[in-house]
Image (cartoon, rainbow, N blue to C red):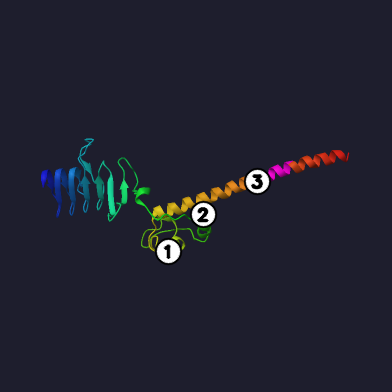
Amino acid sequence: MGEITTASGFATTAMGNNTTASGDYTFAAGTKVSTNNHAGAFFFGDSDPHTKGVRNIGINDQFAARFNGGYYFISDDAGADIGVQVLPGGNAWVAICDKNRKENFEPLNGDDVLQKIARINFTSWNYKMQDAKKYRHYGIMAQDFYNAFGHDKYGTIGNDTTVNPIDMIGIDMTAIQALEKRTSTLDSENKDLRNEIAELKTRLMKLEKLNR
């Protein structure tokens, strides 16, 4: 479908311009993309604005996409668009986090957050049925995070089987801020103590001189 398209494997589809779906059960669409004889692969391509030429899938059963304008996934458009993006030139998913799209702001108690974090178990682990020698991770359990931070006065935050990185970042930043406040207080107290010690040393020296 389109122009200069090739669908040469079993149950394959190629559409657009200069696309190749080779390898069984593959799909290629857009411009200048190829599944490169790898089975079960999907490749979507943009207009190739930098004229890089045909790009190839690297392994079987891979989903690949080339979009120089980035990626924009909306999970709820009932009000403000909510979702995630990969910005043009970006190398990570970013959450749509505009303050103008938010409401019902509720401040967190930093000391309370620190106490809850202290009670959470942090471990290394792997998912069941995955090779433990290759696929290990660090982190907390969704149940523990949800039990500690899953509710505020407005409603529910997250669930007990997944952890939203944005929520975790919010908790982490609150904890960091609370620790900074403690550090500032300790620095101030330490300064006062050093001044008191210096004053006591001065008094002691004066007393020693009087006793000579």
- Measuring from the top left, give residue 132's x and y in whole percent: 40, 58
Residue at position x 28%, y 51% from top? 73
Label 3, secondary structure: give it.
Answer: helix
Residue at position x 45%, y 60% from top? 149
Q: State which mark lies toward you, 2 or 1.
A: 2
The answer to whether residue 175 is visible is yes
Say what amino acid the circle numbered 3 marks. Answer: Asn
- Measuring from the top left, give residue 175's x and y in whole percent: 50, 52
Residue identifier under label 3: 190
In the foreground, 131 or 102: 102
Q: Which residues fall within the magenta stretch?
A: 191-198
In space, the residues marked 3 and 2 are separated at their CA atoms by 22 Å
Residue identifier under label 2: 110
Say what amino acid the circle numbered 1 marks. Answer: Gln
**Mark closest to the chain's N terminus, 2 or 1:** 2
Label 1, secondary structure: give it.
Answer: helix
